[in-house]
Image: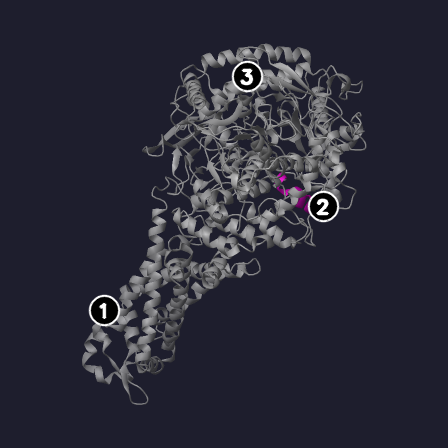
Amino acid sequence: MKLTLDIWRQKSANAEGKMVSYEVDDISPDMSFLEMLDVLNERLLEKGEDSVAFDHDCREGICGMCSLMINGMPHGPERATTTCQLHMRKFHDGQRITIEPWRASSFPVVKDLAVDRSAFDRIVQKGGFISANTGNAPDANAIPIPKKDADIAMDAAACIGCGACVAVCKNSSAMLFVAAKASHFGHLPQGQPERYERVIKMVEQADAEGFGSCSNTYDCEAACPKEISVRHIARLNRDYLRASLFGE
Amino acid sequence: MNLDSKIPSGPLAEKWTKHKFDMKLVNPANKRKYTIIVVGTGLAGASAAATLAELGYKVLAFTYHDSPRRAHSIAAQGGINAAKNYQNDGDSVYRLFYDTVKGGDFRSREANVHRLAEVSANIIDQCVAQGVPFAREYGGYLSNRSFGGAQVSRTFYARGQTGQQLLLGTYAQLSKMTSNGGVTLFNRKEMLDLVLVNGHARGIVTRDLITGKVESFAGDAVLLCTGGYSNVFYLSTNAKACNVTAAYRAYKHGAGFANPCYTQIHPTCIPVSGDHQSKLTLMSESLRNDGRIWAPKKAGDQRSPDQIPENERDYYLERKYPSFGNLSPRDIASRSAKEACDSGHGVGPGGRGVYLDFADAIKRLGQKVIEERYGNLFEMYERITGENPYRVPMRIYPAPHYTMGGLWVDYNLMSNVPGLHVLGEANFSDHGANRLGASALMQGLADGYFVIPYTLGHYLATSGQGKVSADAPEFKQAEQEASERINKLMNIRGKRTPTSFHRELGLLMWHKCGMARNEKGLQEALDKIPAIREEFWKNLFIPGSGSEFNQSLELAGRVADFLEFAEVLCTDALHRNESCGGHFREEYQTADGEAKRNDADFTYAAVWEYAGEGKRPVLNKEPLQFDNVSLSVRSYK
Amino acid sequence: MVTFLARLFRSSVMIKIIMAVSGLGIIGFLLAHLTGNLLMFGGPEKINAYGQSLRDLGPVLWLLRGGILLFFIAHIWSAIMLGKRNRAARPIGYAMKKPIKATVFSRTMMLSGLTVFAFVAFHLAHYTFGKIQPEFFNREYTLHDGRVTHNVYEMVVYGFENPAYTLLYVLCMTLLGFHLSHALTSAMQTFGLNNPKYSKFLRRLGPSFAVIIVAAYLSIPVSVITGILKHKADIEHTALSNEGGIIKEMKQ
C-alpha cells in the first residue's frame, strides 16, 4: 500500500506546530497503524530526520498509552479499537490519512503527537480510590456482591485512561473518564463510604484541570475503545446532585 | 559475593511467621524520617510504594510512563492464583507451594515460595477491599477457574483483564497516598543509574524524558520494581518500553544477576505476520481450557484447516501428555509447538504456527458460551489477523513472555547490595526455572503488599547508615557519568537506528538462545553480540538532542544495556548444562524429547557478578535445598 | 450553605443541572403557550377569551412572566458559563474532525438556542408589545360576555398571511425542534436518568417530543395558509371597517 500522511509536527510544548505531509509506500495490510508509523520513523531516521513522536507501549490495547486522532476520529475509524490494534487492512491503497494529537487544553502537546495526560492522574488522586490500607481487609468472600453489580463495576473499570473521550468531545469534557471511575467504585459495597465525596472531589478536579462540561452528545461512548456506557455519566450526575443537596 | 539467603530456621510453614517476629521494627514516629525510592510503578512497585507510605515512610515513586497506570502488569489477562480453597477442591497453601516449586522445575527457593503461597490469600482479600471487580457467581461469591496446568480452581479473574484491574487497584492506592503526601510521584522519569554510598544503595540518577534533565534522588533504600527483560528478544509480548536498564545498572554496581537464562516462552501468542512486526500479542492461555491444539499430520500440508480431515490432524499435546493434554505447562506446550513447526508441520506464514481449534467446544457448548468466555480474545484475534476464529481455527505460536531470572535477592528481597531491594518480575526469587500461569500477579503483589513492608523496616532499623543528600559527591559523579553516556550516544551520529540494532540482537537471541538452546548456538551468539555492540557504538544515529523529548535516545539507552546483558544471558544458558523449565538445552533431553534436569550438578541458583568492562561475568552459586519436597521428574504425561 | 452555593455556580455538573431545570421550565412554558395557540382552532371567541383570562390574572400573570424570564435567564446564563469553559477547553481545534454518534442537533445547541431566543424576542415584540405589525395589534374583539379585548385571532391570521414572517416562523420552530430533540433526552441524562431498562425510551423521548411540539406549533401557519383558519372579519370587525384598505392590501 502507498499512503499519504498529514501529520502534526510540533517540536516541544511551547513550539509552534504545523501539519506536514509524508508519503509512505510498501505498507503491508497486516501492519498495525503504529507499525506503519514505525516504518515511517525508521525511514525518517535513515534520512537523518527527526522521527515522529507518539505515545505507545503495550500495543495490545490495554495500557491506554496510544492515542492519535486518525482522519478526525480518536483511535481511527474502527469501533472499540485502540490505535495499536487498528490494522492497515482497514485503509485502502492511496488513501490520505490525517494524524493529529488529542486536542485539549488539559492535554498539552509534549511533542508531535504525544500529549501529557497527567490531568487524569490528578483527578484520580482526588478520589478515584477506596481508602483501604494494606492489612485492613476482611475475607474476600465476607461481602457477597451481586453478580450484576460486579459486572457493571467491571464494565466501568475497563477504562484504560487513554483520553479518547476527551479528544472526541466537542467540549473536551472528561466526564466519561470521571464517571467510569466513580461508577466502578460506586457499584461496589466497598466503595459506598466514600461514594459521594469521591464524586464531588473528582468533578471538582476535572473542572480545575480545565476540561469542558458534558453536552450529552454521547460521542465519547462511541469513541471509547472499551465502549464504556454514558449511563455511568447519568449515575455520576445523580450522585453529584444527591451529594450536593443532601451531603454534608 | 555474599549470597546469604537469610532463610529463617524452623519448619517451612512457620518460617515467615517466626521471621516477622524476629525482624526489627522501625518506631512509627521514625518512619517518616526515612525516604524510600521506588523505581517502577507496576504491581510490585505501586503496591510497595502505597503500603510503605501508609506505614508512614516518605516514598519517592518513579515511572517512565506518563502515568503509573500504564505499567505492563496491566496486560496480564488470565488471573491471579490464591490458596483460598473457596471451591472446596482440595487446595491449600501447601498445594500451591508444591505446585509452584514443581512448576518451577525445582529451581526455586522453598522458603520464598511457601511464603508466597501463604500471603496469596491476603492478596485477594486486599484487592477485593480496594474494589477490584473480580468475577463473581450469581450468589455474589467470588468465581474461580483452573488455569495453566493447575488441577484445582484457584485462579481469581476479572474477565480477561485481571492484570489491568489489579494494577488499577494498586494505582488507586498509590494515587490515594500521592494525594495525602505520603508518596511523591515522578512520571516520565527514567532511572539511568543506581547510586551507592558506603556500599549501600542510597539513590538513583534519572533522566526527565520531557526536558532531558539528568538529576539524582537520595534516600535510605532503593526498591527496584522494574519488571523483566523479555525484550532482549526484541519480539516479545512485553510492552515496547520494557527494558533491563535498571536491573542491569544495579548489576554493574555489584548486584548479582541470578538465572538470566530462565526465560518463559508463552505458548498462545499470535504468530508473526511479517518483518514489520513490532511486538507479539499474547492471548490468555485460558483459551487452552476449551481450545484444542493441533497441526497437520503431513509435513508441509498446505490445505486450509477445514479441508484437513480429523484423522489427518495431530492433536499432539493430547497425544503426548494424555493426562494434562492441552493444559500442559507453558514450557512444554511451547516446545511442542516449536517441534511441530521445526519438523515442517507448522501452518500460516513461514510455517511458524499451529492451530488452536474451538470447533469442538463450539459444537459442545454452543457459540454463545464460547463468546461469553473468550469473546474479547476472539475479537482481539480477529482485529489483528483479520480472521474469524469462530469459523477458522486460530493460529498460535510461542513468544517470549516472562523472565524468571532477575536480580538475586535474599529472603528479605534485598540484593547482595545492602539497601537495594528488588521486587516482582525484576527479582529471581519465586518461580525457579518456569512460572505457572496466574502466578506473576500473585508474586508482584505479595512482594509489594505483604513482604517488603516488613523486611524493609528490618533493614532500615539495622543498617546503621546516616543521612545522605543528592548533593553528595557520589551522586554528582553518577549524574555526570549518566550525562556523559547520553552525550556519547548522541555524538555517534552514524547511520543506523536504535530499532535496527534491537531487531538484530533480538533475532540472534531468539534463534540462538530462545525456546531451545545448544552449545554451538550459544557460542555463536556470544561471538556475535560484541560485534553488534561494537557496530552500535560506531554507527548509531539519534536525531535531535539529549535535552528534549527524544524517543530514539530513550530506546538507544535501553538497547545499549540489552547489548551487554544479552551476553550475561547467553553465558548463563551456556553454563547450565541441563534442561529445566524455560531453559531447554537440546543436548540434555530424554529419548522422547523431554527436558532432562541434572540435579546432581545444577541444583543451585547461578548468580552472575559483573567483573568489569569486556570481562566475562563471574559465576557464584547459591545452593538450593529441598527439605520438604523431593526432586522428581516433572511429568505431565 | 456558602460552599453549596459556590459549588452550584462553579461546578460544571451543577451548571448543567441548572440548565436542565431551566430548560424543563421553558418546555413547560412552551406547552402552556401551545395549548393557548391551539385554541385558534376553536375560533376567535375561544382564543380571545383565553387571552383576556390571562390578562385578568393581573399580578399573577406578572409572576408567571417573571418565572419564565428567570428560566430564560438561567438557561442562557448556564449556556454562557459552559460555553466559555468549553471553548477554553480546546484552544487549538482539529484539522479534521468527524462526529461519530453525536447528532447534528446535539452539536448545534448553541446555534439553535440562540436563534430560538432571538425569535422569542421578536415574537414578544410582535405579539406582546405590538412593535412589528402595529397595524394589527390594536384590533378589538367583543367577547360573548360583552367585554372588549384584543383580537388575537385576527392578529395571528394576519401574521401568517405574510409569507416572510411565516417562513421565519417555520424556520425558527424547526430550529426549536432541533433544540428540543436533544434537550429533553439530555436533561434526563443530566438528572441521572439513564438505565438500560428505559434508556431506549429516553433516547426517543426528545426527538418524538420535538416532532410533536413542532408539528403542533406549525399546524397554525399551515392552517392559515391552507385556509382552514381564515378571517372572521365579516362578523367581528365592524369596529375596524375604516381599516379595510389595509386588510385588502395584506391579502394581495
Residue behind mark 2: B366
Task: Residue B415 in the image: state x and y as whole percent.
Answer: 60, 25
Residue behind mark 1: C132
Q: Check if mark 1 and mark 3 are on a common chain.
A: no
Closer-to-camera residue (B308/B380) = B380
Closer-to-camera residue (C209/B467) = B467
Check disc 2: other Cα within 10 Å, few if <14, some if 14-19, many if 20+.
Answer: few
The mark tally for this picture is 3
Kind of residue at disc 3: Glu
* Residue B375 on the magenta segment: yes
Q: Earlier in the sequence, mark 2 or mark 3?
A: 2
Query: Which residue shows up at 40% across the image and 21% down it?
Result: B543
Q: Quadrant of the N terminus of chain B?
A: top right
Kind of residue at disc 1: Ile
* Residue B474 on the magenta segment: no
- Look at the image and tell me whether residue A233 can be seen: no
Q: CA distance from mark 2 to mark 3?
A: 52 Å
Q: Is residue B79 left or right of residue A122?
A: right
Check disc 1: other Cα within 10 Å, few if <14, some if 14-19, many if 20+.
Answer: some
Residue behind mark 3: B564
